[in-house]
Image (cartoon, rainbow, N blue to C red):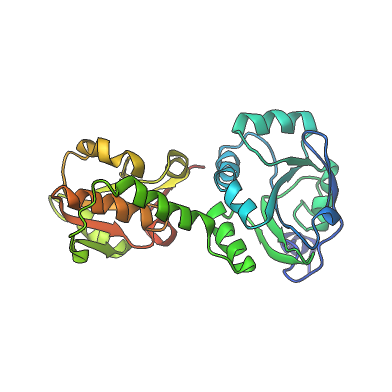
Amino acid sequence: MSIVDKIRDWSPIAVGESAPALSLTADEGTWVRMTDFKDHINVIFIFFRSLNRDEVDVWLKGFQAHREHFEELETAIFGVTTSRTDKLRDYRNSLGLDFYLLYDPFALDSKKFRCSGRIRPFCKDSVVVVGKDGKIAYSTRGRPDADELLQFIAQLEGKPVPGQVEEAEEEERAFSAVRNPGQRPDEVHHIGTEKILSLLNEEDSLFKMVDVRTQSEYDADHVPGTQHIPVDEVPHRYQEFEQTTHLIFMCQAGGRAMAAAEFITSIGGSEIYVAEGGMTEWSGERNAKS
């Protein structure tokens, strides 16, 4: 194998291996050691190359949005890069992150996880999850989103995904006052990407797609051309749809979209659809911030 091939083959540490020793300074001065977490906390290490890149900003904010959910699953989050602690502190504050960023001079600890340049001292965008047993549970190059990691950690812990449970409860509270208890369950239909695109692309189509997730979720990744109104604002902003028929609702997994769809049918709407599986299962074009 040539030197070039060896460099290209520099993939992150393999799942199942024991986690290497790690001892780094957090942006606020705390010393973080791998041994601090063994036997009681899972750890997500988000390695990233440099500060102030739009795609990384969005990526880190995605983890911030789920930070409390990860904590419920006994999982800590740390960002790792080569910038000094003062710069990391300013950067973390600018993004509103509640998890620490670790200073890895010359990417020496990152190199142990194979999440650095093989020759040059920088971190590569990668994610590694270390389980409570001290072994690598998840390892990948690139920028997997927080939802994917949340589902993985929930499976690792054998627990339900925290956000999905809370989402269902919140939707029930938000719409209980206006939902029609006698509504027929077949008034709202779940349809997949192919059917949605078919409806939207019909000649003189009357259909409109509405994304009811939070602003941060929408900003990070959405279907082009969708209208955005968060689910809890639908009851007092639904006039902005300018129609109560031929609507397709989208959220992250389907729950919030169903709540919005049920509200519209309760006030007389018809031809109302929900994107099955939400953005998690959407296979069409998407506008991800980069």
Q: Is residue 107 left or right of residue 181?
A: right
Residue at figure coordinates x 67%, y 34% from the top left: 92
Residue at figure coordinates x 70%, y 59% from the top left: 129
Q: Position of residue 115 (x, y in %)?
A: 75, 54
- Count of numbered marks: 0
Quarter where residue 1 is shown: bottom right
- The one nearer the camera, 119 or 253, is 253
Quarter where residue 81 is shown: top right
- The one nearer the camera, 176 or 268, is 176
Residue at figure coordinates x 83%, y 38% from the top left: 30
- The one nearer the camera, 176 or 221, is 176
Q: Position of residue 248 (x, y in %)?
A: 25, 53
Q: Is residue 136 left or right of residue 252?
A: right
Q: Position of residue 74 (x, y in %)?
A: 67, 56
Q: Is residue 66 left or right of residue 219?
A: right
Whether residue 77 appears in this view of the structure is: yes
Q: Is residue 265 left or right of residue 194?
A: left
- Is 62 placed above or below 2 here? above
Q: Position of residue 260 (x, y in %)?
A: 29, 49
- The one nearer the camera, 66 or 283, is 66
- Is 170 placed above or below 2 here? above
Whether residue 230 appears in this view of the structure is: no
Residue at figure coordinates x 20%, y 54% from the top left: 180
- Is 129 placed above or below 240 here? below
